[in-house]
Amino acid sequence: MSKEKFFTAQEIERMPIHIAAIMDGNGRWATKRGLPRTAGHKAGSETFRRAAEFMSELGVKYFTVYAFSTENWKRPAEEVKVIMTLFERYLNEAIESMAEKNIRLNFFGDTSVLDGKLQKLIERTQQISTAQSGLCVNVCINYGGRQEIAMAAKKAAEEVVSGKIKADDITHELLSRYMYSADIPDPDLIIRPGGEQRVSNFLLWQSAYSEYYFTDKLWPDMAEADFVEAIKSFMNRNRRFGGLK
Ligand code: IPE
Ligand code: IPE
Ligand code: MG
């Protein structure tokens, strides 16, 4: 079991419940090797597969990955197409192996604009997921933190208009229930490989007290040891949540 291989019993007690990752650096990984950017996305999707299995072995409960942002549509159509095809391939494989691996898949983002075939696969994956009890992997596709907050505000406004709630009932707890992450605890640790030290519209609402870990490693190069380093860094931090300890 890898958990014991990498962590002491005391450390295991401090294991984050929810880890998130901004899967960045695929394009640069490929360019460095003289390959097309799309080869980087392919390598990145393999890293995602391995990372999810590793999180499951570590006993992490939630793993949220940023796969495609609301801003990534600005990229050349050909690159977007390859990314969507890789999702399709991943979901087809996941449908076959999810039960055996006991991994649940959940999706954050506006999936209604995705290709019909992809939407069907997403639905099917979600159906199968209801029967699993293990690691919950939240895949953020066409996800943007600002879009998510606006969506939640719109839902709250609609409930006010319909008379279900009053404007005064709108609290941050209520808005949390309208986010894609309803019922899921906020991320403890957000890992961003790829060398950029920014949020890029990821989990704006949920990251109020998340710990960040930035590394220059590119996403496709992220191996078990790199995730362990990020988690150990998290374990040594003092989270005060505004208090004094
Ligand atoms: C992240 O890698 C994957 C997506 C945004 C879909 P990038 O494609 O952003 O890789 P870099 O940052 O250009 O290296
Ligand atoms: C963030 O990476 C989005 C994903 C990894 C899906 P980007 O490459 O899109 O972020 P920026 O453009 O460098 O901020
Ligand atoms: Mg990038």
Image (tube, rainbow, N blue to C red):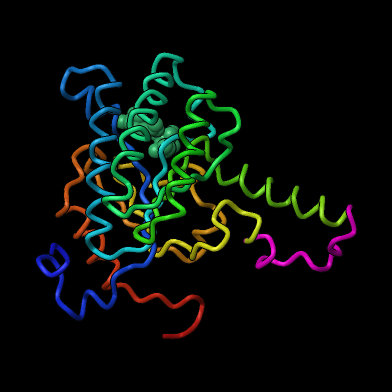
Q: Residue at x 51, y 31 (%)?
A: 120
Q: Is residue 245 above or below residue 145?
A: below
Looking at the rendered structure, the number of numbered marks drawn on it comes to: 0
In which quadrant of the rendered view does residue 136 lie? bottom left
**Over which residues does the magenta segment extend?**
162-176
Residue 172 shown in magenta:
yes
Compared to residue 34, the image places residue 105 above or below, namely: below
Q: Could you tell me residue 33's position as x and y percent?
A: 15, 22
**Extreme-left residue of the structure:** 5
Q: Residue at x 27, y 71 (%)?
A: 235
The quadrant in which the C terminus is found is bottom left
Q: Please state, as top left, top right, bottom left or bottom right, where the N terminus lies in the image.
A: bottom left
**Spot occupied by residue 36 in the image (x, y as percentages of width and height):** 26, 17
Q: Position of residue 147 (x, y in %)?
A: 62, 42
Using the image as rendered, state which of residue 188 and residue 178 is in the foreground: 178
> What residue sits 16% from the left and 52% below the top?
224
Q: Nearer the viewer, residue 42 or 1?
A: 1
Q: Is residue 221 shown in magenta?
A: no
Res. 57 image quadrant: bottom left
**Pick the front one: 195 or 156:** 156
Horizontal placement of 56 versus 66: left or right?
left
Farthest residue, direction bottom:
245
* Residue at horizontal 23 percent and vertical 36 percent from the top: 46
Image position, residue 108 (x, y; %): 52, 45
Is residue 234 found left or right of 161 in the rendered image? left
Height in image: 132 above or below 87? below
